[in-house]
Every structure is written in structure tokens, then in C-alpha cells.
């Protein structure tokens, strides 16, 4: 009985991983189309055209749309009553092994210090799994993400003194954009995390990348800053792939949590044009559906 | 050899100085013939450990890339997805790499800096950027993946030996005179960034 249930989860997750490295989430695809329609620079238009041709070919030929399928990350928002919670970590790891063989994914898990590539995308602490236990629920929502090298590299976290003010966030973010953003494959999704320390800010910046590209923070100040940053970064004019053009970003998302009276933790994290974030929800009977990929049927 | 096919500039290996001498930063080309991958570890072996590049890359092309390759039952290789990785990581090796190997076209993601530009000027070579994350567009230009060298480095880092046809579009970012497309662009971007930073900071200071 349990073996059957386990197989449902492993198969569904391996197939979802395969799907989400080949097909962009609905919101990212739509946003790219919107930006390309606004573009007037001929070189930038040619780059968008290559991107769309790539998306079509990836779907037709059933291949990963970018060769860098990243280090696999899961953010598991698991209802406290979800019956398979106990097994999840092992099953997600099995799904990664299966997807690495079948999709195939590029083996990207290099053990630190020994520098050995494990060859199967599994290692100590990889796949990366973050847990949120959601009380009074019996379903399980899983976000998948493939953190590529190019878009992970610009990430940065720092703790400011509160006297620096929230304005300190602006140069902190913009400097990373011009310094490293070109190599993170624009148009970028910029995730900004604000909190009390490096790790809360960094985790918030990761959660910001899991929000849809057009979403708006429900904190009015954060929402205003999202808008100001989006306009500002677009005005820099990186264009697709940094060759120059009328926009630079898919969006800017800010997630903020309280700070300590004496600290202001800030982190910035980048998603690339191939922002392969996915979300799938299992109900307690293991029926599942994706909330990001309307084409995913299992 | 350089040909114009359907309005595309197609350069075929072996690449001669006259094929690339008249190209300018910002031009778009396509590549046919032999192409080798080589990234961090390969550059390190060639330039720091003094090992010979494991293939005839003189007058050829190197691609900063770590592909996804599938080995088929008959032992042959299928190029599933291949796209450029950040070229800047190779900046500290590239001058020596161009000098040691005689490579003419260096392909990767984003731009490179002064040492590579100096290498391009002194040894008549160019750097090109391939649109990144377009790994299937690139993979379908690979006609054959004939082998792999230095496979001990793992799939992303090994040297993959390919035959490509009209591989591209490739945008020249450093030409043989050392003109640097991205370094010039970056000056524009930085100037606009400073303006924007000031504008937004003022808005927020009013909070
Ligand atoms: S930044 Fe994104 S699109 Fe670009 S190579 Fe990396 S994973 Fe692919």
C-alpha cells in the first residue's frame, strides 16, 4: 500500500521536474512575450526571437531548455496532516535521481572541498529541501527550482545598521545588477529579502523568487519599492542577455519580515529569463496538479 | 573560410586571420566545422599545468560550455542541450590560452575583459557571445558529437568534440583590434544606474 503511494509521488515528481526544466511557467512565458512586444532595438528583438525559438524546440524535442539544470531545490509547504510527510525527503531524493537519468538533467552536484561531482545530482544536503509546516492542512505544496550558476552568482546578503535606512537597499541591489546581472541572462527576476540577519534576508529573497513575476507585495511600502526598483532597473536598459534594450527585468519581488532594533538584513537573489520555478500540490489522496504550469498533466 | 548564406556570415574552421580581421564588435556571425568545449578546469590544465589541449584547436574555436550529453546504446553521444557559461570566469586564463593553443574564436556568455582583449589583439582572435539559455537552439546545430576528452573532469567540465553547422547567432563582443562591446555597454549601464539610484534613493528618503 505504502509502496504504491511512494511510487505515485516519485513518478509525479520526476515527471514534474522533467516538465519544468523543459517548459517555462505560464507567468514567465507571458511576461517574456509582453517584453518582446515592447522591444524596439533590432538586436534585442533578434535575441528574443532566438529565445522563443529555443522554447519551441525544447518543447518539440522534449529537452531541457537550458543546459544548466542547476542544483535542485525544493521548498515544501507541507500540511501538518499530510499523510506522507515522513517519507517526503527520501521520495524527493529518489525523484531527483530518476529525473537525472530520464530527463536527463546535467549532473551539477559538486561536493565541497573534495570537489567531486557526484554524477547524479544528489549529495550531502542535496537536493536542497526547505520545509514549512502548514498547520490545519492535509495537502502538500512543493516548489521546484533549479538554481543555475549564472543566476546564483550575483546573489548577496548583508546586514546594515538601521541608520543606513531602507534607502541602503537601492545601491545594494542596483550595484549587483550592473556588476553581475549581465551574466545572469536578463531579463531578470529580482528577489529582495529584508529581515533581521543574513539568513532570514536570504531566505526571504529566495521566497521572493518563488512569487509570480507580476505579483505585488501586500506591504504598501514594499510594493512601492518593488515598483521603483522595477522602473529603475528597466531604465538601465540591459535588454535581453545584456546586449542592450528597452527593459531589464521580468519583475522585482520583495519579501520582508521584522528586523532586530539594531539590524537591517538585506539580500538579493536573481532569476534568469529561463526562470524555471514550478509548484505542484498533492492532496491527501495524492491527486496532484500544478499551479504554475497549465500544460502539466502528470 | 567565410561565406554569406541567406544573409548570414558563416565562418568555417580552420579559421584564418582574414576571416575575422574585418569583423567588428557587435557583428553577428555563425560557425561551421569543429568546435570544442572548454571551461574552467580545461583552461587551468592548459595554462597553469602546461598540458596540451586534447584536440586540434589551432585556428579553431572553443566554447565555454558544459553540456548535457546522452550516451546511446551503441556508445555514440547525443548532444541534448548545450549553451554558454559565463566567460568572465575564464578571464584570468584566456590570454595564455589563446597564446598556447592558437585558437581563433572564443565563444561564451557575456563579455570578457582587458587581458582577453589584449590576447585578441596580439594573436588575431575574437570573443563572441552566444545567447544563453538557448541550449536547444545550440544543440540542434551540433551535427555530431564525436568524442570526449578529459572525461575525468565530469560532464560539464570535460572537453566535448563536436562538428557544428551554422552554429549561432554569435555576437562579436571583442574584435581583433581589442574593441570590447560589453565593456563599452557597461559604461552606459553604470551611468544610468547612478542616475536611477539617486532618483529612487530620494523618493525613499521622503518615507
Ligand atoms: S543564467 Fe539561467 S538561462 Fe542563463 S545559463 Fe544560467 S540557468 Fe541558463
Image (cartoon, coloured by chain):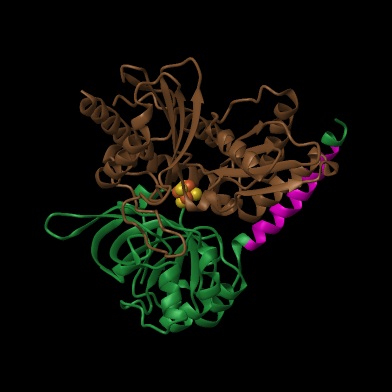
Chain colours: A brown, B green
Q: Residue at x 35, y 37 (%)?
A: A92
Can residue A92 be seen from the camera position used here? yes
Viewer-proximal residue, A239 or A249?
A: A249
Viewer-proximal residue, A97 or B158?
A: A97
Q: Which range is magenta?
A: B183-202
Residue B183 in the image: above or below residue A288: below
Residue B200 colored in magenta in the image: yes
* Quarter residue B71 falls in: bottom left
- Where residue A104 appears, as percent x and y from the top left, is 29, 46
Most common SS among magenta residues: helix
Residue farthest to the right? B206
Residue A246 in the image: above or below residue A34: below
Residue A137 in the image: above or below residue B89: above
- Where residue A119 appears, as percent x and y from the top left, is 32, 56
Viewer-proximal residue, A283 or B166?
A: A283
- Where residue A265 appears, as percent x and y from the top left, is 71, 42
Q: Residue at x 51, y 75 (%)?
A: B93
**Left-right relation of B198 to B114:** right
**Left-right relation of A287 to A151:** left
**Left-right relation of A159 to A149:** right
**Left-right relation of B50 to B180:** left
Residue farthest to the top? A136
Residue B76 colored in magenta in the image: no
- Where residue A233 appears, as percent x and y from the top left, is 68, 42
Can residue B102 be seen from the camera position used here? no
Q: Quadrant of the C terminus of chain B?
A: top right
Q: Residue at x 48, y 33 (%)?
A: A131
Q: Residue at x 32, y 35 (%)?
A: A91
Amino acid at each position: 500500500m505504502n509502496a504504491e503511494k511512494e511510487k505515485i509521488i516519485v513518478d509525479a515528481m520526476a515527471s514534474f521536474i522533467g516538465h519544468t526544466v523543459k517548459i517555462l511557467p505560464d507567468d514567465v512565458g507571458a511576461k517574456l512575450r509582453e517584453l518582446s512586444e515592447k522591444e524596439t532595438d533590432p538586436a534585442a528583438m533578434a535575441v528574443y526571437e532566438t529565445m522563443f525559438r529555443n522554447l519551441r524546440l525544447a518543447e518539440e524535442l522534449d529537452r531541457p531548455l537550458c543546459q544548466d539544470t542547476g542544483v535542485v531545490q525544493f521548498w515544501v509547504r507541507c500540511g501538518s496532516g499530510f499523510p506522507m510527510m515522513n517519507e517526503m525527503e527520501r521520495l524527493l531524493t529518489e525523484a531527483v535521481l530518476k529525473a537525472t537519468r530520464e530527463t536527463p538533467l546535467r549532473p551539477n552536484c559538486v561536493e565541497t572541498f573534495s570537489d567531486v561531482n557526484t554524477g547524479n545530482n544528489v549529495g550531502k544536503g542535496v537536493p536542497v529541501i526547505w520545509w514549512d509546516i502548514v498547520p490545519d492542512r492535509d495537502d502538500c505544496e512543493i516548489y521546484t527550482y533549479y538554481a543555475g550558476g549564472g543566476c546564483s552568482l550575483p546573489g548577496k546578503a548583508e546586514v546594515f545598521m538601521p541608520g543606513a535606512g531602507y534607502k541602503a537597499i537601492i545601491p545594494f541591489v542596483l550595484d549587483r545588477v550592473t556588476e553581475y546581472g549581465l551574466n545572469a541572462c536578463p531579463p531578470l527576476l529580482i528577489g529582495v529579502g529584508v529581515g533581521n540577519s543574513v539568513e532570514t534576508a536570504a531566505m526571504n529573497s529566495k521566497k521572493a523568487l518563488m512569487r509570480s513575476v507580476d505579483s505585488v507585495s501586500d506591504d504598501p511600502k514594499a510594493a512601492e519599492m518593488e515598483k521603483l526598483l522595477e522602473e529603475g532597473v528597466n531604465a538601465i536598459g540591459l535588454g535581453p542577455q545584456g546586449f542592450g534594450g528597452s527593459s531589464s527585468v521580468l519583475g522585482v519581488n520583495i519579501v520582508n519580515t521584522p528586523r532586530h532594533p539594531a539590524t537591517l538584513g538585506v539580500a538579493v537573489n536573481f532569476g534568469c529569463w529561463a526562470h524555471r520555478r514550478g509548484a505542484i500540490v498533492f492532496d491527501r489522496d495524492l491527486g496532484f496538479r500544478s499551479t504554475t504550469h497549465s500544460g502539466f498533466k502528470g | 573560410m567565410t561565406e554569406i548564406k541567406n544573409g548570414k556570415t558563416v565562418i568555417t574552421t580552420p579559421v584564418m586571420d582574414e576571416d575575422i580581421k574585418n569583423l567588428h564588435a557587435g557583428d553577428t556571425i555563425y560557425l561551421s566545422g569543429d568546435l570544442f568545449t572548454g571551461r574552467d578546469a580545461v583552461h587551468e590544465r592548459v595554462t597553469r599545468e602546461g598540458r596540451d589541449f586534447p584536440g586540434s584547436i589551432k585556428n579553431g574555436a572553443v566554447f565555454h560550455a558544459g553540456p548535457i550529453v546522452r550516451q546511446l546504446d551503441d556508445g555514440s553521444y547525443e548532444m541534448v542541450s548545450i549553451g554558454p557559461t559565463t566567460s568572465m570566469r575564464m578571464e584570468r586564463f584566456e590570454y595564455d590560452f589563446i597564446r598556447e593553443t592558437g585558437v581563433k574564436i572564443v565563444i561564451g556568455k557575456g563579455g570578457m575583459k582587458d587581458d582577453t582583449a589584449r590576447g585578441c589583439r596580439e594573436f588575431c582572435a575574437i570573443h563572441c557571445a552566444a545567447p544563453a539559455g538557448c541550449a536547444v537552439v545550440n544543440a540542434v546545430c551540433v551535427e555530431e558529437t564525436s568524442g570526449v576528452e578529459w572525461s575525468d573532469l565530469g560532464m560539464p567540465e570535460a572537453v566535448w568534440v563536436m562538428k557544428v553547422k551554422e552554429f549561432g547567432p554569435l555576437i562579436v563582443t571583442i574584435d581583433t583590434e581589442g574593441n570590447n562591446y560589453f565593456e563599452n555597454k557597461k559604461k552606459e549601464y553604470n551611468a544610468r544606474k547612478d542616475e536611477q539610484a539617486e532618483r529612487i534613493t530620494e523618493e525613499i528618503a521622503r518615507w
